[in-house]
Image: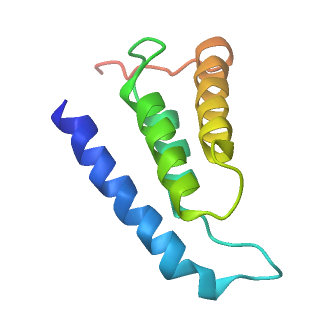
Amino acid sequence: MKKLLLAVFILYFFVLIHASFCVHFGFLGCLFNLPIIITAVWNFFEKEKGFFSPALIASLIAGFFLDVYSSGIIGFYILILGTAAVFIKIFLKNYVRVPFARDV
């Protein structure tokens, strides 16, 4: 619970940075989207904890925060980040094998 609450505050901080600071550094209309990068990296490096892992919940929360600060359709970023997290989990579970280090 503490980990998820800390993740909410960190993601909120990154969404605020994205909404206020990164807007000025667009290159050819593309923005540097910190919350999407953070949630994707967290989903890649989290150990398998079942389907509703803290990384999936944090992805949905980050999507909610991005929706609140965007001018687009409400629920768009929730849908995008949620499906990206699910696809990352499915891809890692089915197609990636992590070798364990052996004692020499």
Residue that lies at the very extreme toward the left in this rendered image = 2
Q: Quadrant of residue 61?
A: top left
- 26 shown above or below 87: below
On the picture, is 76 further left or further right than 93?
A: right
Residue 36 percent location from the top left of the image = 57, 52
Front position in the image: 7 or 44: 7
- 30 shown above or below 83: below
Coloring applied to the structure? rainbow
On the picture, is 22 further left or further right than 100?
A: right
Residue 52 percent location from the top left of the image = 44, 17
Residue 22 percent location from the top left of the image = 56, 79
Q: Split into 4 quadrants, where in the image is the N terminus? A: top left
Front position in the image: 69 or 28: 69
Residue occupying image coordinates x 76% and y 82%:
27
- 86 shown above or below 74: above
Residue occupying image coordinates x 53% and y 63%:
69
Residue 74 percent location from the top left of the image = 64, 47
Residue occupying image coordinates x 50% and y 82%:
21
On the picture, is 53 further left or further right than 29?
A: left
Q: Split into 4 quadrants, where in the image is the C terminus? A: top left
Residue that lies at the very extreme toward the right in this rendered image = 28
Q: Quadrant of residue 84?
A: top right
Number of marks drawn: 0
Front position in the image: 104 or 26: 26
- 18 shown above or below 55: below
Residue occupying image coordinates x 58% and y 23%:
89
Q: Quadrant of residue 81?
A: top right
